[in-house]
Amino acid sequence: MDVTELTKQLKTAAPAMVYLILGTQQVLQQAAVDSFLQLIPADQRVMNVGRYDMEVTPVASALDDAMAAPFFGERRLVLINKPYFFTAEKKGTKVEHDLDSLANYLAHPEPSTVLVFLAPYEKLDGRKKIVKELKKVAVTVSAAPLDERAARQQVVAQLSAADFQIDDDALETLVQRTNADFGLMMANLTKLKILAYQEKRITKSMVTELVPQSLDDNVFDLVTAVLRRDQVRSLELYQQLLAGQKQPLQINAVLVSQFRLLIQLKVLVQRGLSQGSMASKLNVHPYRVKLGLRTVRQFTLASLNNAFLGLIEIERQLKTTQRDPELLFQLFLLRYSR
């Protein structure tokens, strides 16, 4: 199940005894924690909620807490964070974990305790015996990063629940400026709701005003202008980046990275890979792949390679000469346009 389903279930039914929240999306991990906290009355949380970080605390301490009776309440909540012993990771920590005791607890969990493992990892090591024991009893909740479509739906749903609306073009701009990263989208919603408090409606101008463009976003516009051989627009965007206190080497490094991605996408398109497969293979956000595919379909591989090699030459000269960065970029544009 996902975190939304978990929240609904905890409001309408008795909780399970063991949960696993698996995934790297921190905002979803926190949303799950908030939902579990609602199980314990506010005046009982000091005594009946325990939090344990497995990178600094033995699991035995958490189990002692989990096996204790609730203190003047119906149930206890024990949150175990970063249980790296479920993964293939090797931590340089001196903390010793009694996994036999953990296995025994999983076989006979305490009925009055809700034990939650907060695992901010992509996956667990399914070969481990303790992981197999965990999966027999735990309800697994996904906190994996949302794709663009799911992120859009969650933003609209959360705004609707708070009696807010967001215009279509405002949502599109929010997606673009955050690269469809759900965590960044949610972080910016707090500011947007304050600005739209009276009208309860978020507009494109509000998003433009409050949500900054990342360097990658600005450079993506520059990449498009370069590929279209629009020298005037390219130079204008480059000057804007310099005026924004971006360092020439930093700008060039992001340009090189963008063109490298476009070349990789062009090759993978020719091999017939799907958009999802490309994102997985290149280990980049699906939204970046989506934007990149829109671009590569308009240009040849030779054109992309020429721009990439020209930028590599700029990088060499930036590191080995004292030539003016803006002049180097202008010369690059002239050579590329020819």
Image: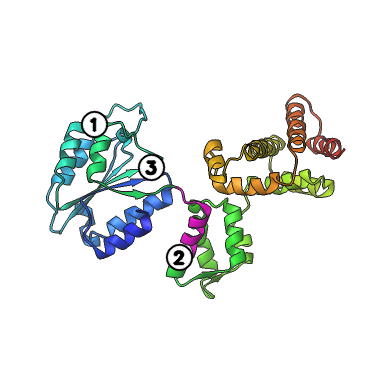
Task: Tell which tag, 3 or 2, sits nearer the viewer.
Answer: 2
Q: Is residue 64 visible?
A: yes
- Dot 2 falls on a residue whose secondary structure is helix
Magenta stretch holds residue 95: no
Q: Nearer the viewer, residue 148 or 54?
A: 148
In the image: residue 134, left or right of residue 243 = left
Which residue is labeled 1 in the image? Answer: 97
Considering the whole magenta stretch, tell me its main secondary structure: helix
Which residue is labeled 3 in the image? Answer: 120
Q: Nearer the viewer, residue 276 or 327?
A: 276
Q: Residue at x 12, y 50 (%)?
A: 69
Which disc is residue 157 wearing? 2
Residue 130 position in % (x across, y down)? 24, 34
Q: What amino acid is found at the position of numbered circle 3 in the picture?
A: Pro
Magenta residues, as a range?
Answer: 145-159
- How far apart, in angstroms, are the residues tagged by discs 2 and 1? 41 Å
Marks 1/3 in contact by CB < 8 Å: the verdict is no
Task: Tell which tag, 2 or 1, sits nearer the viewer.
Answer: 2
Whichever of callouts 2 and 1 sits on the residue coming sooner in the sequence is 1
Residue 274 position in % (x across, y down)? 57, 44
